[in-house]
Amino acid sequence: METNPPPTQDTAPLVLPQQTFTQTITTFLQEPLTCRALTTLQVNLGLRCNQSCRHCHHQASPDRHEHMTTDTMHAILRFLPTTPVKTVDVTGGSPELHPHLKDFITALADHGYPVMVRTNLTALALPDSSGLAEFLKDHGVTIVASLPCYLQDNVDQQRGPGVYHQSITTLSYLNSLGYGVDPGLPLNLVHNPGGPYLPESQADLEQIYRKELHERHGIQFTSLLTITNMPIGSFLNDLQNTNTQEAYQTLCRSSFNPDTIPGLMCQHQICVRWDGRLYDCDFNLAADLPIRSKKTTIHDATLHDLIPRPVATAEHCFACTAGNGSSCQGALVTP
Ligand code: SF4
Ligand code: SF4
């Protein structure tokens, strides 16, 4: 009788220690990582923020002054109709601190683009932001709100004293407007780990957030997105200060999951910096790793210059492919 050979256990690591991310991804794809579609345009309005969080990959803070000019906003509005972009994702810093945020959103809405705005929740509560939440509601804007944990200590430790309570107050107000309650007003929360480890399962954590935030504060939300901390910017400084940089980078490398590759956001988006320079994603923007194209700004590039294009990759990209994967839209695979 023919017998099957005993199952072999393949314990070889997927990523060799000396392999770069570019080599690793090329091995799996049999070609370089490439952006072949453009469904999302992410717009970074600038680095001024009312907070200065420990994990911020941009090192945003109240002392930063980079911000997008109206000239660059106009260039974006001219570029969009020449593309198949479906969604405009507005981020920062704190988008709320940009003096022309409302004008920009109005113009995008007039052109028929679905818009999402990323907020840290406390900036939405500043006196200068009075009426902004109602404005976002009136323009059907999706709100993506960072809340790294459902527990006060963890949030305040990462983001500063008092941030948790202010965030909860803002979430309650958004709920009262219908955000996170009315299906037409999505309110998505963003979790990132409090230290040098990978996020838990997004689905499991969403259940816990839903239960805890509802029981403690009566808060409702639409979805939870988990994002892996990027070893760049303030989080890199934090890793260096705690002598955990090497261990974290080893964790990201050794957790490489090839199933995350099809979902990598750099394959279907582009990110515009405040000065109009173009990047494959907000993380490459933070690392100042520009796109690989002859035309590198929103002022001169056409769709033809950008699609297809090889994605610029570096060591930090291992954070996107670790475990369940990570992107600005959350995890990439379900465990
Ligand atoms: S993580 Fe967000 S809220 Fe915190 S400093 Fe950076 S941009 Fe501001
Ligand atoms: S960091 Fe950016 S370029 Fe690198 S894999 Fe992630 S999304 Fe792609």
Image (cartoon, helix red, strand yellow):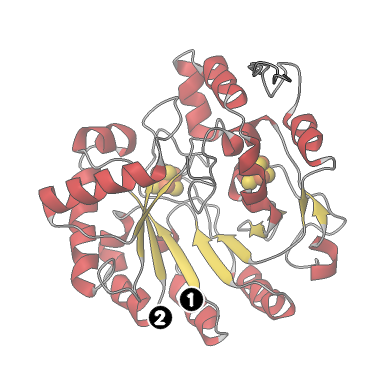
Tell me how far mark 1 sits from mark 2, CA to CA: 8 Å
Residue assigned mark 2: 139
Query: Which image quarter: residue 257?
Result: top right
Instruction: Please determine whether, in this image, residue 208 is positioned above or below residue 246.
Output: below
**Is residue 24 something that shows in the picture?**
yes
In the figure, 22 relative to 134: above or below?
above
Q: Which mark is residue 38?
A: none
Q: Nearer the viewer, residue 258 or 55?
A: 258
- Label 1: state its secondary structure: helix
Q: Residue at x 75, y 68 (%)?
A: 299
Q: Seen in the image, is 49 located left or right of residue 319?
A: left
Instruction: State which mark lies toward you, 1 or 2.
Output: 2
Residue 294 placement (x, y as % from top left)? 88, 56
Q: Is residue 39 left or right of residue 303?
A: left
Classed neighbour count for the residue bearing mark 1: other residues with Cα under 10 Å, few (<14), some (14–19), many (≥20): many
Alpha-carbon neighbours of circle 2 within 10 Å: few (<14), some, or many (≥20)?
A: some
Position of residue 212 in the picture relative to residue 241 (left or right): left
Q: Residue 105: which disc? A: 1
Say which quarter of the image contains residue 251.
Answer: top right
Disc 1 to disc 2: CB gap under 8 Å? yes
Query: Looking at the image, is 223 positioned above or below residue 52?
Result: below
Between 185 and 270, which is closer to the camera in this rendering?
A: 185
Image point (80%, 33%), residue name: 27
Question: From this viewpoint, which residue is outermost toward the front?
Answer: 1
Amino acid, disc 2 = His
- Could you say where residue 21 lies in the image, as x and y percent from the top left? 72, 31
The single residue placed furthest to the top in the displayed view is 243
Residues 310 and 53: in front is 310
From the top left corner, tell me how far across and down residue 41 is, in percent.
Answer: 62, 64
